[in-house]
Image: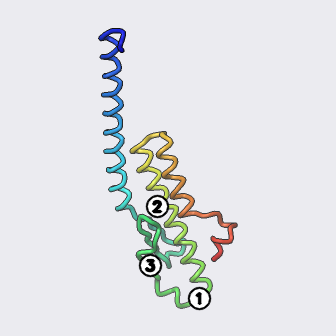
Amino acid sequence: MWADDAALDAAERRLDEWETSLAERAERSRTLSATMRNLTGTARNADRTVDVTVDSTGLLIDLWLDERIRQQPAAHTARQILETTTAAHADLLRQVSDAATESYGDDASAQAIIDSYRSRLLPDQGSNDARR
């Protein structure tokens, strides 16, 4: 089937390189997954009355309110919490972007991960879902 041994050797080398490449990519993926599980996003509003922390999925895991919050309308406090949570999501997205780029470089896989997080963490502010 093979014209000569050199062609067979070249084909075997290509298969070995492909297998090595897949193993390295799998290891990078495992490392990235472990890194991303431990990420949290944090933010503090401008007047330092609201601190928010979100976990690696974007869920609120910590909220701190300064006592000065009591001296403002509840609607204003609610807006501050939502805005600070959005800032914490942006912080998490930045960390995800850094980790994905570090693992995959400019590869399409890195961009797909970043885009997936972006669509979940920072939905279009004009959509009906964002206003719920």
Question: Residue 35: image x %, image y %?
Answer: 34, 55
The residue pinned by badge 3 equals: 63
Asked if labels 1 and 3 touch by Cβ distance under 8 angstroms, the answer is no
Q: In the image, is residue 37 above or below residue 49?
A: above
Closer to the N terminus: mark 2 or mark 3? 3
The residue pinned by badge 1 equals: 74
User: Marks 3 and 1, Cα distance to the nearest angstrom?
Assistant: 15 Å
Q: In the image, is residue 29 above or below residue 57?
A: above
How many C-alpha atoms fall within 10 Å of the one at disc 1: few (<14), some, or many (≥20)?
few
Q: Residue at x 47, y 45 (%)?
A: 109
**Residue 53 — which label?**
none
Q: Is residue 65 left or right of residue 29?
A: right
Q: Residue at x 70, y 66 (%)?
A: 126
Is label 3 in a helix, a strand or a loop? strand
Is label 1 in a helix, a strand or a loop? helix
Is label 2 in a helix, a strand or a loop? helix
How many C-alpha atoms fall within 10 Å of the one at disc 3: few (<14), some, or many (≥20)?
some
Q: Nearer the viewer, residue 131 or 62?
A: 131
The residue pinned by badge 2 equals: 92
Q: Nearer the viewer, residue 99 or 113?
A: 113
User: Marks 2 and 3, Cα distance to the nearest angstrom?
Assistant: 16 Å
Amino acid type at image mark 2:
Leu
Question: Residue 87: image x %, image y %?
Answer: 53, 66
User: Marks 1 and 2, Cα distance to the nearest angstrom?
Assistant: 27 Å
Rendering quarter of residue 105: top left
Point out the residue furthest to the front here.
1
Q: In the image, is residue 73 above or below residue 36?
A: below
